[in-house]
Image (cartoon, rainbow, N blue to C red):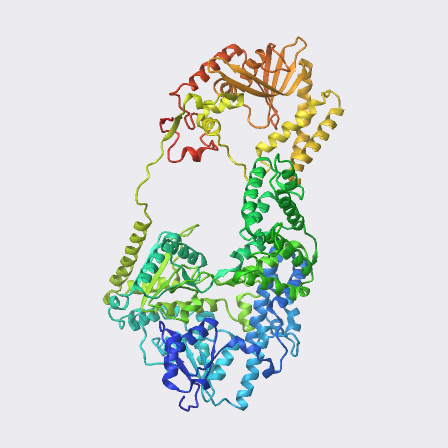
Amino acid sequence: MFDPTDRPRVFGLPPGADFAAQFVAGLTARHDDLSRVRIFVNAPRMARQINAAFDAGPPRLLPRVELVTDLSLEGAIAGLAAPVSPLRRRLELSRAVAALMAQAPDLAPRAALYDLSDSLALLMDEMHGEGVDPARLSALDVGEQSGHWQRSLQFLTLLQPYFATGRDDPDVAARQRMVVEDLIGRWQIDPPRDPVIVAGSTGSRGATALLMQAVARLPQGALVLPGFDHDMPQAVWDGMDDALAHEDHPQFRYVRLLQALDLRAGDVAPWTDAQAPAPARNRLISLSLRPAPVTDQWRADGATLGDLRDATAAVTLVETDSPRAEAEVIALRLRQAAAEGRTAALITPDRMLTRQVAAALDRWQIRADDSAGLPLALSAPGRLLTHVVEAMGGALTAEALLVLLKHPLTHTGSGKDRNQHLLWTRDLELRLRRHGPPFITPDTVPAWVSGLRTPQPGQAAWAAWVAEVVRLLAHDGTLPIADHLTAHRTAVETIARGPAGTDTGELWKQAPGKAALGVCNALARDADAGGDMDLRDFAALSTALLAGGQVRDPVAADPRILIWGTLEARVGGADLVILGGLNDGVWPGAPKADPWLNRALRKQAGLLLPERQIGLSAHDFQQGAGAAEVWITRARRNAEAETVPSRWVNRLTNLMAGLPEQHGPEALASMRARGDGWIRRAVAISAPAATVPRAVRPAPCPPTAARPKEISVTQIKTLYRDPYAIYAQKVLRLRALNPLRMDADAPLKGTVYHTVLERLMAARPDATDPATLALFMDTARAVLAVECPWPTVRLQWLTQLASLAPPFLRDEAARQAEGAVLQLEAWGDITVPGPDMRLTCKADRIDATPDGDALIYDYKTGTVPTDKQQAKFDKQLLLEAAMVERGAFATVGPRPVVGAAFLGFNAAMRVVAAPLEKHPADIVWAELITFLTRTQARDWGYVARRAPALSSYDSDYDHLSRFGEWTDADYAVPLVLT
């Protein structure tokens, strides 16, 4: 197949070439008996693409296409023990990291335990792959390093046992290197006579690089490199010998490979005679990516590029104002490619961008073939597993329970009963929103069902099933992983099964379910390696394992519309390649921080530098930019701030702008103009077909018969300030739903404090008696124990009540000297003549003086209204006085009112008397009759936000009145309703 040579044999394919197709073409041109050829590739997708290229040809015996990583499975050849599972090793390392964190709490928060374990496992894999022994780490010079790195090195020396030879549980990476070394040793004794090829790898990993070097030296061995830059001068190749300065160059891995093989760039022969899709553009990209120390060559070598308008005629530069706009433009271009029957690939490391593009393609019912698939954690089984483990332990909130009950996999084992389950879940949600409680116990749902007037058939069994779920979610404690996993799976399967189910329904079915079950089974197999852990750590472990899984979308995708990660840029080809998300920090991504070794220590140890990943990303960019037609897209802003273009985009645009003689500025302007044209198209498509006029400030005028005939004294203020809220509440009969997650907010605090005062005063205590203070606090504790389920808030409120009790009792003594409590929480109602409306009231407290006159008090934990506010809007106490004098309270009877006051129950303890002398009850009553009579007129409109006290006033009905489309300065428009 290959001509004999005494030098290593290395071939290359140019950037932009369809590697799989060109590799197969070159191989079939060289050899007829392909069955004798052994091919190593570095990724499953590469293997699939090469096999697909062979399948597209004539019938023949095909070569063996193997993954480099599969060499670790050749135990019989190497005589090595089977590798330990990565999960088991990770669990073992997590125990070591947990011990380290216990000794050094400042290392990282507890929640980072498994992230640190992952980073440590990756470091160990890298050390195995690069042949770095922990003993070398102990010899590193840390004299000028901080204490953190010194402590880190001390910890890493504890990894020595994992590197011992002859272990019966070697790591996968260690075993792979040993297998490669063993294979190389056997090849040196008895070289294979048949061709052996390593295709499509850059040699970025130590074990792979060793294999590539050995294969290149075989009599019939060869390397076929993807994206090899034949346009870069030899002088530049020779100058890239310093990893610290050049690791981020796209060709640096090849520099290292060629140095190890004692070859020069000119020794790398083209694999085929086929030309690159865009040779002129490849020369431009190559020059733009020259190492920083030699960018002075731009002017000299730029003159040789020719007319850049020709080189970039098939390049479009899209710079949008937001990531969403970028996704919409990309989706529009992909749609056109699909309509033309062309293949198009979006290449980006930005998963958020790919999701937005996929969502935008849904507009045209186009489903792209996403190589990354769907994260297992975002699949239905993954979400259910995550929701359950997050809900376990501690107090179960109503929100968490309803998330589980509404999940699409819940109750799927009970067949058609799921529809009824959803109806009962909706009823339960309304109950919990309106009445609570904030935390669910096993008795909550059965008690609600048993209290229904007419429970439906099967509802009691359903409630018992929910109670069982709540009991299972109470699992907690520091236990072996296997016990946590059993409890976790039992809860998940019970939820999926339903009350009458015979199996787990759809939980473990389909690809996502099978993958999730595989994660659970793998954890069960290796659970003993993790020891005991608390539920919080188990939840973090479970969530991390699910986040690491991927599943293919079960819906058939369009094979012509592709979404690839950056690694796929070197695998396949497409008619159109879109390089998306080209902003610094995205592509290339920021180097990940290594908590164990900094950059200087890594270089000393002979490990890979963080810039290596940037260099690999640069190579992916160079490969993608060489396609026949290329789009380069980025967003000028993200959600937080302005973005910075990717360094490669900056280099390209700066180079072109600096070559006017080659028409670089004109070519760059054309690239942008093409992109701006597509942006305008996307904006036009997204624009609404018709403009919806802004809503006006409403003042609905319903028929008199539909207007409310009953109103409370506290709602009179709302009728003055925001009549629309009364219209929505009493005419439309709408009321806001309380949030599922109940908070210890100001309204609840006011209710609790009112209850404390009501129960205290119901005992008719003597405020001057020292024992009353103890009674006050005992009452407060009893009320808080029932009404405030949050321990921290309960303690805070109890402390506040303890500080408020002495001044309250002091003032209460003065009130008791004026009169005695006559009625607490007194209900009253009276018919208002004229409008014929019923006025209702619930008075906090009515006292009686020795002369039989009435004193009215209202407790206020918030802001106490001023005299002016009471005179114009907040007429609560004035109207209560008028009602008392007219006998509206049956238990009080008609009697004169000699005083009324708001009692501030807060730090200020202000007492604000109602202005009864300025506004006598008779006059207030007459004004009320006039006002309510006017509200019953057919032309009186319920104006939205008529006179809010503050501009920040937030009504429950603002969204209904379309506030925001109009402002408080707009005139109200009467809307006569029939």
* Up/down of 376 relative to 281, above or below: above
Note whether 168 is above or below 768 in the view shown. below
| Residue 947, percent from left and from top | 43, 25
In this picture, is 813 found above or below 175?
A: above
Above-or-below relation of 205 to 732? below
- In the depicted view, which residue is nearer to us: 497 or 573? 497
Residue 870 in the image, given as x and y percentages of width and height: 51, 19
Please state if 247 lies on the left or on the right of 785 as rendered. left
Task: Indicate the quadrant containing the N terminus: top left, top right, bottom left or bottom right.
Answer: bottom left
Instruction: Decide which of 121, 405 is in the foreground and name it.
Output: 405
| Res. 355 visible in picture | yes
Q: Give x and y (percent) for residue 929.
A: 47, 14
Give the x, y percent position of residue 650. Answer: 36, 62
Q: Can residue 740 be seen here?
A: no
Q: Tell how many labels.
A: 0
Direction from residue 393 to residue 838 in the image, left or right: left
Q: Could you tell me which residue is drawn at 31 percent across and 50 percent down?
A: 685
The residue closer to the viewer here, 730 or 923, is 730
Q: Residue at x 57, y 56 (%)?
A: 505
Quarter the C terminus occupies: top left
Question: Residue 27's image quarter?
Answer: bottom left
**459 to the left or right of 252:** right
Specify the farthest residue to the top: 851
